Amino acid sequence: MLNRRTFIRKSGLLAALSLGSHSGLTAGMTTETEQDLPVQRPRILPRRLKKGDLIGLVTPGGPIKKEQLDEAIIKFEKLGFRTCYNDSVLSEYGYFAGPDQERADELMHMFTHKEVDAVWCVRGGYGSIRILNLLDFELIRQNPKVFIGYSDITALLTSVYEQTGLVTYHGPLGISDFNDFSLKSLEKVILDPGKHYRYPYEREDDTEGNPEFDRYTLHGGKAEGELIGGNISVLDSMIGSRFEPNFENKIVYLEEIEEKTYRVDKMLFHLLEATNLKKAAGIVMGVMGDCNINDEPRLTLKEAIRDLFEPLGIPVSYGLSFGHIKKMVTIPNGIRARMNAERNSFKLLERAVK
């Protein structure tokens, strides 16, 4: 019988045994086959979650405090899940949750341990991009399970999907606000999905008069395609690496937080010029809080992103319910969706779990 508090707390030995028993390789070792993985593998749907499932908590980016871990555990227990974690989940190494190899080992351990049903990131921060080359994507592909987070976790969500074909989920972190709106979307995507799911919208409380939380159309039209995307600054930092996402013919979802307007402008321009983002089927933008910030002379956030995206001639909408906000929907990478920029809406066209 599992004890969720102690299941993986003797983590150093267990992590080594788990990784070694599956491949004879450490998480940082690669083979010629792994290095030659195609950009995108056949799609894999993980099993849907149900009450009683075991959630493996990980910190692949920034560090957390014990109080944050305890609060996250309570949230998952209220949802009917059990939780487990390595001692390394509370590690600190400067602004990282432990050294790179330790964070990679922690993530690999949760993917390869047969009793863990989902891998859930407790927080973002910074650091996920630094462990990409230390992961064994073939082992992840062989052990498909729900993997969820957002913000810095964008690097992992997009890379795991494109390197393995495993659908991943841009959704609440362990430290996020588990409010009714967010939990209902989570349920419709990874617990009890229907054939189609139209994403709801609900404006954040106390944001009237704040243009960052407005909804509007930047360029009209409709589009269908696979979903891919995440945090703008993280996607920008992946340009030129073997993990740079493929945006062609996809619906790209984008969000950001606490960046001055000119920096958002610069990152979006870089993505447009250095990747195939111009070939996207459409772009859905979430809430970009604290990004309508300018020195004189001013150019509003809306004006900046309109200038960049309107010439593309593809549907682009702004202000949907995702990003660094309390009321967020869960978005699956790799699932087909349809957007309508005039209505500022989009929906999933297929189930995101099996």
Image (cartoon, rainbow, N blue to C red):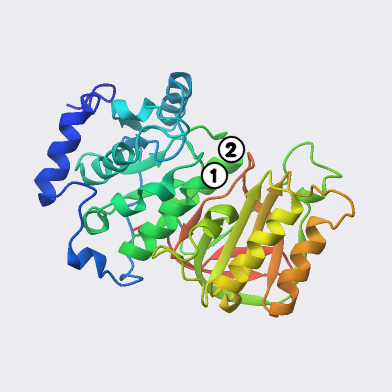
Residue 88 higher or lower than 202, as above or below: above
For this view, does 1 lie left or right of residue 81? left
Quadrant of residue 51 within the rendered picture: top left
Quadrant of residue 8 within the rendered picture: top left
Residue 237 in view (yes/no): yes
Residue drawn at 19 percent across, 43 percent down: 114
Q: From the image, tell me which residue sits under label 1.
A: 184
Near-viewer residue (345 or 143): 143
CA separation, marks 2 and 1?
6 Å
Q: List x then y, in percent, for residue 172.
A: 51, 42
For this view, does 82 lie left or right of residue 225? left
Quadrant of residue 280 within the rendered picture: bottom right
Near-viewer residue (148 or 74): 148
Q: List x then y, in percent, for residue 258.
A: 68, 43
Residue drawn at 78 percent across, 70 percent down: 307
Q: From the image, tell me which residue sits under label 2.
A: 180
Q: Which mark is residue 163?
A: none
Q: Quadrant of the N terminus?
A: top left
Q: List x then y, in percent, for residue 135.
A: 28, 51
Query: Contact, CB < 8 Å: mark 2 with mark 1?
Result: yes
Residue 192 in view (yes/no): no
Residue type of the residue flagged with mark 2: Asp
Q: Residue furthest right?
A: 297
Near-viewer residue (237 or 17): 237
Residue drawn at 40 percent across, 48 percent down: 130
Residue 219 higher or lower than 176, as above or below: below
Q: List x then y, in percent, for residue 201.
A: 68, 52
Residue type of the residue flagged with mark 1: Lys
For this view, does 207 lie left or right of residue 75? right
In what element is the residue under mark 1?
A: helix
